[in-house]
Image (tube, rainbow, N blue to C red):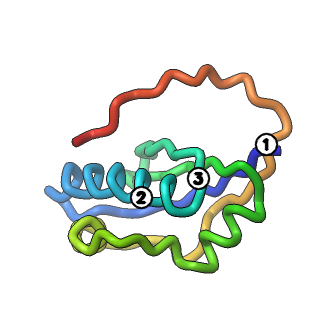
Amino acid sequence: MTFVAAYWWRVKPGKEEQFRKAWCRGTEHIRQRYGSLGSRLHRDDMGRFIGVAEWPDRDTWQRAYDAKMKYDDAATRAAFVEALEEWADEPILLMEVTDDLLDRIRNDPIT
């Protein structure tokens, strides 16, 4: 069954576009390197960005998490980290999907 992990970040004022672009590129690297199914980025009422990543199973996520989801694109990682003001050290939610009625329409990532 599919597995979901959610994370949050607070971004420095004026760095939102930089963060979103780096998040999109990083998500693609994580998909390619670790087998993620992709992720969605949301913004909550408190101004935090919330990433909800989907994985084929918990074991695949755990291997990526244990590897700190590192990828070979230092510029993307630096842009991501430089945009951050605050973040959670651990995922805020780890969940097994029991029923999925979400329509899968892929939006083009920010480039």
Q: Earlier in the sequence, mark 1 or mark 3?
A: 3
Front in this rendered view, residue 8 or 101: 101
| Quarter of the image where one finds residue 63 | bottom right
Q: Which-is-in-front pick, marks 2 and 1?
A: 2
109 left or right, relative to 102:
left
Judging from the image, what secondary structure is the residue with disc 1 in?
loop
Judging from the image, what secondary structure is the residue with disc 2 in?
helix
108 left or right, relative to 4:
left
The answer to whether 30 is drawn above or below residue 87 in the figure is above
Q: Whole-percent x and y of residue 28?
A: 41, 51
Q: Which residue is mark 3?
A: 36
Q: Identity of the amino acid at label 1?
A: Val
Q: Identity of the amino acid at label 3?
A: Ser
User: Residue visible at 82% across and 31% down?
Assistant: 99
Tell me the CA gap for discs 1 and 3.
15 Å
Q: Which residue is mark 1?
A: 97
Q: Earlier in the sequence, mark 2 or mark 1?
A: 2
User: Residue visible at 58% across and 53% down?
Assistant: 36
| Quarter of the image where one finds residue 2 | top right
> In which quadrant will I find the C terminus?
top left
Judging from the image, what secondary structure is the residue with disc 3 in?
loop
Q: Whole-percent x and y of residue 65?
A: 61, 72
Q: Which residue is mark 2?
A: 29
Within 10 angstroms of label 1, few (less than 14), some, or many (20 or more) residues?
A: few
